[in-house]
Amino acid sequence: MEENIDTRQIKALAAIAGVLISLLAFISGSFTWVDNTFVRKEIFQERQRYAAGEVIEQEEKIAELIRVIEEDRQRRENELRKLIKDSSALAIIIRRDFLLSRDVDTLTPSEAAELNFLSSKLRQLNIEE
């Protein structure tokens, strides 16, 4: 016995297969759509504002940390400069005082020039004579 499938049955089967394939494609596409865009716009915008606020808060914390680090670095640098200035000035003051302890008329020309140089150096370092 041979079964003959007529054209109408083939068209009906093709229509059913097309509907099934379309239905499966729609279901598959809807899962992708739900995954990507089913979030309400209000919730998405609120999440964006929250994320932007978090970024701004983190940037402010980083800026504050940089400011604290810079202040600490500047303070340490100033302390170091003061120590260098004080210690270098001490040697200059001792040498100047040694030259001043002698009679100015007995100083050699090089010692007199050295005394003038040391005095100007102390003025440059803003140390009172």
Image (tube, rainbow, N blue to C red):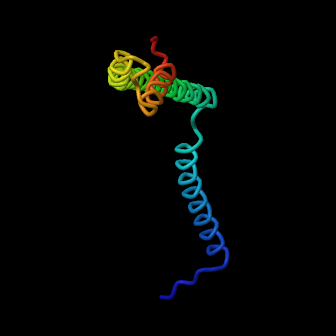
- Going 55% across and 28% down the picture, which residue do you hit? 47
Left or right of residue 82: residue 24 = right
How far from the left and from the top, in percent, is residue 80? 36, 25
Task: Check the image and report above or below for 13 versus 39.
Answer: below
Residue 123, horizontal then vertical, whole percent:
50, 19
What is the quadrant of residue 13 in the picture? bottom right
The C terminus lies in quadrant: top left
In the picture, residue 76 is in which quadrant? top left
Q: Residue at x 45, y 15 (%)?
A: 127
Task: Answer whether residue 5 is visible to the viewer in this image.
Answer: yes
Q: Kindly give the residue lying farthest to the bottom in the view shown.
A: 1
Residue 92 screen position, x and y as percent: 37, 24
Residue 110 lies left or right of residue 94; in this view the side is right
Q: Is residue 72 visible?
A: no
Residue sitting farthest toward the top? 128
Q: Is residue 21 above or below residue 66?
A: below
Residue for point 51% across, 28% down: 59
The residue sitting at the front extreme is 105
Res. 75 image quadrant: top left
Residue 27 place in picture, x, y as percent = 54, 51
* Viewer-proximal residue among 21 and 128: 128
Q: In this view, does 82 lie to the left or right of 8?
A: left
